[in-house]
Amino acid sequence: MPVFFEKEQHVLIQLDNATDWQSFCDSCEGYINPLYFRRIKDYLDQTAKTVVIEKGYVDADYRDTYFNFFSRKFAQYPSKTIRANFFTDRISPQMLFKLDRYQDAYIGFIVLRPNRVAPIGRTILNPSKLPFVSGHVCTAESSVHILGAELKARGFPYMSQDTDVTVCAHAACWMIFRYFSQRYSRYAEKWPYEVSQLTQDVSIGRLVPSKGLTAFQVTEMFANFGFSPEMYMRQQWGDLFEKLLYMYVESGLPVVAALSGHSHAITIIGHLSDFSIEPILTPASSDVFLTGLIANDDNFLPYHAIRKNDPIPPTGYWSRFKVEEIDTFIVPLYEKIHLSAEHVIELATAILSDGMLGLNVLSKQLKYEQIVTRTFLTSSKSFKKMRRGDSVPFGIASVYSEMAMPKFIWVCEISTPDLFKEGMIVGEILFDATANPRDTMAFLSIHYPDLLLLNDRDFLTNDPKRFSVHAVDTDEIIPYRCYVNNLCEV
Amino acid sequence: MNSLKKLKMKKVTNLLASKEDVDNVRFSLEQKTAQAFIDFAKSKQKVQEMAHLKYLD
């Protein structure tokens, strides 16, 4: 009977078989219903070997909805929750007070809310510990304290809607807000009821209990949270729509995606790419390798894969939705990102194919017709930090370190199909993310395999001194590592 | 920039060295992007007009 401390606040269950899982369900009685129990069991059955249950756990997110909403109902709702912590190792009961020794085995936690309908509250599960998850995903770290032991939960925050205060669109926004507040100190933590009050638009009805949100309201909530959001609709952007979506996700920006055919909203948090795909045509951009997106859909558990093409692969955690069903997305941009993805695509293409600045004119080593590009947004701080420790040839890493850059830059990496498969690039164009889209001199630098051109952004005129051009006479292309910091590879 | 002294590349002085050259670069880039940027502005306006029609529950 591997259930320990059954009558205590902290219960440890070794999950060896179906009976043990039933013990988990019994220990959480009233806080979990059969549907959600099955969902959790099916999700973690092959991975979790121990669960540590914390009864009477005070969860700030549930407390917020409790005090502002559930406490006002006629029926009693408990104010506390249960937090279930899952581990990949079989932990003996003697180790209950030393759980920090099991950091490597820590999958994460699921908070169970006693709201009678949809119990899964704040959840962080490490995608690297889940064998059915693969791809590139946004992750953030959160501290967890169990019986005095501190553990780190790494993953993308998740919760399901409670169908009262929050619906799918609230849950999708909350996940993004929580990701940002965990990862960047400039963003304050927002709880679910607070999230529901971030829109003041009551033109379609009261805010709570909520019956749904419009894309307009989601954008308003993003703006009131502190973002400078942009909205894209497939109908208006056509073929460019999926490319733009991919570029923002590649930039480490999770987006709220709407599937209007299902009146549903999900959070896109990563992508699945198959780099063994041979691009049919070059020049190509890296979205040609895209096979799917990774989403947090509040109707399921985290890291749901959304396929680009049929059929659904036999293994993995796949959604019934397809990428083509996403018809709108809202991206949470930082206020100082003025240049949007579509402008950068155009500017980069114009430069690379230009009669004076293009590859075919300025590089002897590489032709425009041979290249694969990958374009993304990143902070100049992270870019400099990574490039500093990298072997960018000819001392260019030092130039980047010293270059004056805005807080955020757009990067268009240049590679070839063969090198890109190995995660290697041969150059990049950097853009000032604060530039006006119509300022065609928005680039900070152009680096081709045998040339470096710097553009002084402070020049107002076409004075040639704004450019500083450096070249090397070489027969060899020296590749270096592509930029990796925005997403975590799983 | 101090780091340019350590750069293992030679400074090129005859490339994009006149005001006319830079004029031409700017003109060329403007020409290549002008129509796309007009289309983008129209798309964004349309998106704003339709935002209230996308209902998510």
Image (cartoon, coloured by chain):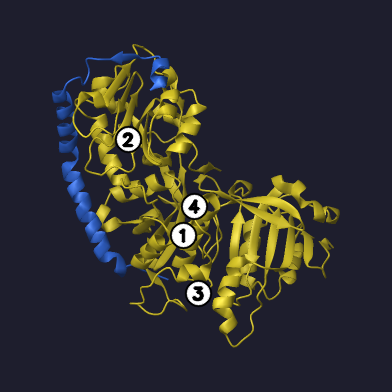
Q: Quadrant of residue A439?
A: top left
Q: Position of residue B17 (x, y in %)?
A: 20, 19
- Name the quarter where the C terminus of chain A is drawn: top right
**Horizontal side of residue A173 vs B21, given as left or right:** right
Output the letter for the chain in yellow.
Answer: A
Say whether mark 3 and mark 2 are on the same chain: yes
Q: How far apart, in angstroms, are the residues tagged by discs 2 and 1? A: 29 Å
Q: CA–CA distance between discs 2 and 3?
A: 45 Å
Q: Are discs 2 and 1 located on one and the same chain?
A: yes
Please give the residue where the numbered disc 1 appears in the rendered image: A320
Tell me the CA gap for discs 4 and 3.
Answer: 26 Å
| B22 with respect to A20 (left or right) | left
- Residue in the picture at 52% in, 55% down: A181
Q: Residues within 10 Å of mark 1 (few under 14, many from 20)?
A: few
Residue carrying label 3: A165
Residue A164 spot, x, y in % from top left? 51, 76
**Side of A192 relative to B5 (left or right):** right
Chain under disc 3: A
In the image, residue A318 lies at what x, y percent? 51, 55
Label 2 with label 3: CB-CB less than 8 Å:
no
Within 10 Å of disc 3 (Cα), the crowding (few <14, some 14-19, many 20+) is: many
CB within 8 Å, label 2 to label 1: no
Chain corresponding to blue in the figure: B
**Amino acid, disc 4:** Arg
Do marks 1 and 3 both belong to one polypeptide chain?
yes
Q: Residues within 10 Å of mark 4 (few under 14, many from 20)?
A: few
Residue carrying label 4: A186
Provide the secondary structure element on which disc 4 rests.
loop
| Foreground label between 2 and 3 | 3
